[in-house]
C-alpha cells in the first residue's frame, strides 16, 4: 500500500475524531436526552438544530465519502483496524478539551490498540 493511502486513512481518522468532538460539544450544550418519548423527541430535534451537532454530523458524514475512496484502494483487513486509532485521539482530546478523567487503564488500552494497529499494518505501507 502506498503512503498516500496511509495519509488518507489518517485524515479520515482525524476527521472522525473532529466530528465526534463537535457532536459532544453540541450535546453538552443541549443537555441529557431523557424523559418521556415526547420529551426525547423535542430534545433530539433541539439537538439537530445545534450548530455543533450539525457540524459534527457534517464532518463525521464526510468521512463516509473518504472511506469509500479508501476501500477502493486498501484491503479492508488493513484499513478497518486502523480506524481504531481514532479511539486514542478521542481519549486524548476528550481529556484536553472536555477535561474528562482518563484512568490509567484506559491509557494502557490505548497503547494496546496502537500495538495492534502496528501489527496489522506492518509491511503494508512500504510501497
Image (cartoon, grey):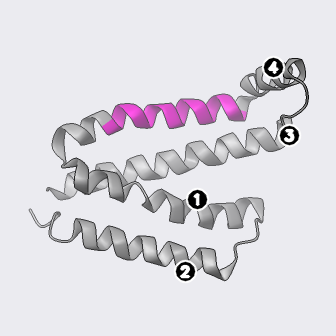
Q: Which residues are magenta?
A: 52-67
Give x and y (percent) for residue 86.
48, 57
Give neighbour class at mark 4: few <14, some 14-19, many 20+ (Cα, 10 Å). some
Rendered position, 122 above or below 38: below
Q: Kindly report which numbered mark, 4 or 1, lies closer to the viewer in this rendering.
A: 4
SS class, disc 2: helix
Give x and y (percent) for residue 62.
45, 32
Asked whether disc 3 touches disc 2, contact meaning CB atoms under 8 Å apart, the reply is no
Give neighbour class at mark 2: few <14, some 14-19, many 20+ (Cα, 10 Å). few
SS class, disc 4: helix
Left/right placement of residue 11 relative to residue 60 reads left
Give x and y (percent) for residue 40.
83, 25
Q: Nearer the viewer, residue 24 or 8?
A: 24
**Label whose residue precedes the other's in the sequence (1 or 3):** 3
Rendered position, 101 above or below 15: below
SS class, disc 1: helix
C-alpha distance separating marks 2 and 1: 14 Å
C-alpha distance separating marks 1 and 3: 20 Å
In the rendered structure, does residue 54 fall within the stretch colored magenta?
yes
Q: Give the residue pinned by disc 1.
A: 90
C-alpha distance separating marks 4 and 2: 38 Å
In the rendered structure, does residue 64 fall within the stretch colored magenta?
yes
Left/right placement of residue 4 relative to residue 31 reads left
Q: Give the residue pinned by disc 3.
A: 32
Amino acid at each position: 500500500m502506498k503512503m498516500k493511502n496511509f495519509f488518507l486513512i489518517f485524515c479520515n481518522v482525524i476527521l472522525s475524531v473532529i466530528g465526534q468532538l463537535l457532536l459532544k460539544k453540541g450535546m453538552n450544550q443541549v443537555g441529557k436526552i431523557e424523559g418521556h418519548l415526547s420529551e426525547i423527541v423535542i430534545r433530539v430535534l433541539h439537538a439537530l438544530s445545534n450548530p455543533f451537532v450539525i457540524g459534527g454530523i457534517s464532518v463525521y458524514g464526510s468521512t463516509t465519502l473518504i472511506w469509500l475512496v479508501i476501500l477502493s484502494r486498501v484491503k479492508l483487513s488493513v484499513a478497518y483496524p486502523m480506524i481504531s486509532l481514532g479511539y486514542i485521539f478521542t481519549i486524548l482530546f476528550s481529556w484536553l478539551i472536555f477535561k474528562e478523567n482518563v484512568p490509567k487503564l484506559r491509557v494502557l488500552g490505548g497503547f494496546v490498540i496502537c500495538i495492534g494497529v502496528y501489527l496489522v499494518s506492518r509491511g503494508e505501507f512500504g510501497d
